[in-house]
Image: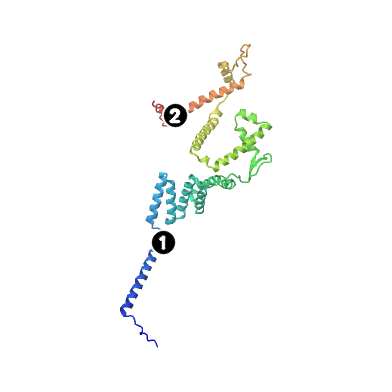
Amino acid sequence: MELREPPVQPTASHVDGLSRGLLVVVLLVLLVLGWVLVSRSSHETGSPIDAAGIREVAAKLQAAGALDEATLQYERYLEVGRPDRQVWAGIATSLGNNYLEAGRYESALRWYYEAETMGAGEFNEELAGRIVQTLERLGRSFAAQAALSNRAGLGESAVERPADDPVVARIGEDEIRRSEVERALDDLPPELATELASSAGRSRLLERYVADALLWRKALTLEYDRAPEVLRQHGQLLKQLAVARFAEQEILSQIEIDEADLRNHFEANKGRFTPPPKAGEEASEPTFEKVRSAVERDYRLMKMQSAYQALVDSELAAQDVELFPEKLKREP
């Protein structure tokens, strides 16, 4: 029979040591878990001060032209700042612009769509154009055209059309009427309009009209209509057209033509209306009846220039105007 020693009971001090060790380990684990949770919560929510600082840095980078870093900071701000929908939409639009300028069109489209989903508010007009432009850059022309129709309202609302104004062309769902092409014909210089007035010429005119419409749509999708130089020239052209119409309605229409004045003008400027002689022939003075239309055009132009100058002088005298022509000269 084997004899064994009786089991030894642990002393009270040994038990207390083990308990204290386990308690320390548990406390350490709880502290680590708490730190992890706090750190994760801080990363997910961010403090208002930190978020505001990130946005300020992003704005400064954007202003400095450091678009790559600005993009990173703006994306970081959206992660930690949790701004309201309007601010989110504005920043998302800026991110889309940065990616568009960098040639990263898919990323640009993603942020534009986020801005749209957030309800871009005041950015809607800009946003719609940028979506169209990005889709075009991605080669998705049909999607770009659909978005462009929503932006520019190219499709006309249903209206009653007279029977004598038939459809002469279609671009997708948009119809081109004969009256539109004829108005374009009226806007051409007289020589070109006469050339295109024939049946064969009208066919070329229609092709040109449709081609211009297609290129105009293409230019819109790429936002060339918003280029600074185009806008500047558009403003100048608009001013010239408005002044020309003003002169036509307010000056030219007020000029009265008297037959005696026309004859006097012809007699005083007969040499101006005398054609050069042909080789071997003597010059012959024209009769008034033969050159009457030319005399009237010349007389109207003279009267219009005189009336125009009188109007300009009157406006200069009535308004507080100072001219400094010497400052137009550049120093050598």
Q: Mark 1 sits on what residue?
A: 40
The quarter of the displayed image where residue 14 is located: bottom left
The image shows residue 27 at horizontal and vertical percentages of 36, 70
Q: In the shown orientation, is residue 125 left or right of residue 56?
A: right
Say which residue appears at 46% left-offset and 30% top-offset.
315
Say which residue appears at 61% left-offset and 38% top-offset.
211
Query: Depth check: 61 or 226 in front?
Result: 61
| Residue type of the residue flagged with mark 1 | Arg
Q: Secondary structure at mark 2?
A: helix
Q: Are marks 2 and 1 in contact (CB under 8 Å)?
A: no
Mark whose residue sits in front, 2 or 1 = 1
Q: In the shown orientation, is residue 298 left or right of residue 56?
A: right
**CA distance separating discs 2 and 1:** 72 Å
Query: Depth check: 143 or 270 in front?
Result: 143
Query: Depth check: 201 or 245 in front?
Result: 201
Q: Mark 2 sits on what residue?
A: 316
The quarter of the displayed image where residue 83 is located: bottom left
Closer to the chain start, of discs 2 and 1, is 1
| Residue type of the residue flagged with mark 2 | Leu
